[in-house]
Each structure stands twice: as structure tokens, then as C-alpha cells.
Image (cartoon, rainbow, N blue to C red):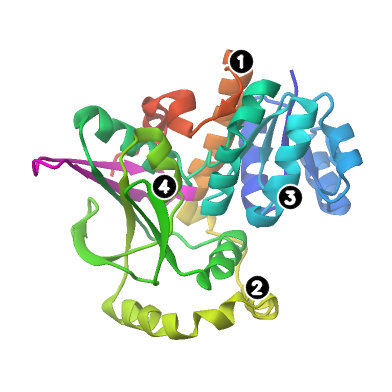
Amino acid sequence: MKWMIYGANGYTGTLMAKHAKSLGLTPVLAGRNGEAIHRLAGELELPSVVVDLTDNQALQQALAEIDVVVHCAGPFEITAAPMIEACLATKTHYTDITGELSVFEYAHAQHQRAVDAGVVLCPGVGFDVIPTDCVAAKLKQKLADATSLTLGFDSASRMSRGTAKTSVRRLGDGGAVRQDGKIISVPLAYHTRHIDFGNGEKFAMTIPWGDVSTAYYTSGIPNIEVYIPASPKLVKKLKRLNWFRWLLRFEWMKNFLAKKIDQQPPGPSEKQLEQAITYVWGEARNDKGEVETLRIKVMNGYKLTSHGGVDVAQFILNHQPQGGYYTPSLLCGSELVEKYYVDA
């Protein structure tokens, strides 16, 4: 059976390709940059194909004999839909490493089409959102009647260029939380609180993380927020930025900021990949005031993503689940995250 890493020449795609090779696996490396794809494929002695997502006919031809694709080429708000459409047409199982709310919601909206086609749609098979999604599932198991769920994480790792560009593209939309089962747009740094993620209490703010979408489908809990640590100074800046967010919605502004990001390193250093662990925290509450809390420590987010994409692809190949939309924990079980625990 064949599987593909699309966008294999990107920072995370390359990590994933190298990890797959280290396990003796032979994914097809794909992307639109022929020179970069063939160079990486030659280095790793893996098959390759060059195809642009905008060429639907060529994309379907490239996927015709592929059983699972791990889509790593963002920004996914632009790239996910054409890849999902091609996967539904060719009956290729779809996974990706997105953390973008709109992509999760789009994929979920294709559930019945995926069922009919016998195709798995499972976005978010990396750090976005395996650890937090599995924490959500475990908390639901602990507190079955929970009505609110708060998740968060703390990482010292540098962002990759791709992650930074995606974050910039969404700044103009502000934040997001789920209230009474519905995702609502809110200002940047909408809520703040002090949280012990596992390494001491820190001031934290809400972010529009993927779990605002996915944790609801995993747990059914109707009220969800996600937090990361932030300095009071940053929170003040973001609150002021809310007055000018409309500027950040212009494509020319997004492109200007993306060019600035291109001047940064491609992603975390080798040292960070090995040493910058991530603290993940979750808290569930019910209407009686009962609370369940869970804290875990996992590997660096990009390293986890490179492993998670491979692991979920292999799970699909080995288990051949029924078609439809899945979150990582619904597909593989909440114990999936335990593969990425670290001691520190």
C-alpha cells in the first residue's frame, strides 16, 4: 500500500520524511517545487512526484494509486480544500498537520461525502491537535457530564516559517472560543487567567487553537477555550491591536508580513527539537462545580508532528477504518498521545 507526504520539502514535511525513512518506510514525497522535492527524494532514496494543487487533473492522477496522503503544505485555508476534493474523488484517505479552525470545520462539513466515498478525513495529525485532543478525550472520560473545557500548552520552541505565516494570516480575524456548542469570534487576548501548565503558574491568554473546533467533536463539551502563556505586555499590545485588526485582513498586508517571516530561520534548531519539551494542560468542569485536571509533557511540537503524521498514516493503512471525519483521538484512541510523552 502506498502513502504520500505532500509538501515534503517544507520544514515539517522534511522532518516527517526523514523520520519515515528512519523507520524503513517508503512514502512518496510530493510537492510543487520540483527541484526541492527531487533533491530530498534523492537524498533519502524515496520515490517522488511533482504536482501543483491548482492542477486538479494532475493531482488526481498523482493520487490514483495512493492510499493515504499526509498533507503538509500550508496555509491550509488555501490548500486543504483542493487536496480534500482530490482525495474524495480518488478514494484516498486524507490527513494533514493543520491547526486552522476553518480547515477543521470544512473537513467536518464533508463528513457524509467522506462516509459515502469510504475516505477518512483526519486533519490535525501533528502537535495541532494530537496532544490537546487526546487530553480533551481523557478529561471527558474522567468527567462525563462536563459542560466546559479549557485546554492549553506551554512551549519554548521557535515557530517554523509556515506556522508563523499561518498565524499572521489569521490575526485579522481575531480570536475564537466555543460557547454553547458554537464557535464565536472574539477579540485577540479575549480572556486571561493564571495557569500552571506543569512548570509553574503563568499568566496566560486565549488563542484560536484548533481544539475550539476539534475538542467539541471529540468530547461533545459545548464550551471550550484554549490558552498559552503570554506576558502582560503582549496582552496589552494585542488588545490595542484589536482596534486595527481590519488592516491585517488585506492580502497585501498578509504578504508583507509573510516576506518579513521569510527572513527568519526555517524552524527550531536541532537542539530545540530534542530539548524543548511541551507542557500540555486541560481542565474540565460540570454544572455542579466539579473539576478534573490533567497535565502531560510531550516532545517538541515539530518533532511530535513529524512522528504523528507517520503514525496516523500507518494506523489508517493497518486498520482501514470506515470513511468519515475524525479527530486524532476518535480515529486512533486517546492513548495515541502516550507515544509522545517525555520525562523531564
Quote the CA–CA distance across marks 2 and 3: 18 Å
Numbered label attached to residue 274: none
Q: Position of residue 326 (x, y in %)?
A: 52, 31
Q: Nearer the viewer, residue 219 or 125?
A: 219
| Earlier sequence position, callout 4 versus callout 2 | 4
What residue is disc 4 on?
211
Q: Is residue 30 visible?
A: yes
Region rendered in magenta: 275-301
Q: Percent from the top left, x then y, of residue 205?
A: 31, 66
Give the amino acid at mark 1: Gln
- The residue under label 3 is which amino acid type? Asn
| Residue denoted by label 3 | 9
The amino acid type, in three-letter code, at marker 4 is Asp
Quadrant in which residue 156 is drawn: bottom left
Where disc 4 sits, the SS reads helix
Q: Mark 1, residues whose alpha carbon is within 10 Å: few (<14), some, or many (≥20)?
A: some
Q: Nearer the viewer, mark 4 or mark 2?
A: 4
Residue beneath disc 1: 320
Q: Which of the pair 211/233 is nearer the observer?
A: 211
Viewer-nearest residue: 262 or 178: 178
Looking at marks 2 and 1 on the same chain, the residue that comes earlier in the sequence is marked by 2
Q: Are marks 4 and 2 in contact (CB under 8 Å)?
A: no
Q: Dot 3: what SS? A: loop
Q: Specify few, some or many for label 3: CA neighbours under 10 Å numbering under 14, 14-19, or 20 or more.
A: many
Q: Alpha-carbon neighbours of circle 2 within 10 Å: few (<14), some, or many (≥20)? A: some
Q: Quadrant of the C terminus?
A: top left
Q: Which mark is residue 258?
A: 2
Please state, as top left, top right, bottom left or bottom right, where the N terminus lies in the image: top right
Q: Taking 219 as reference, is 324 left or right?
A: right
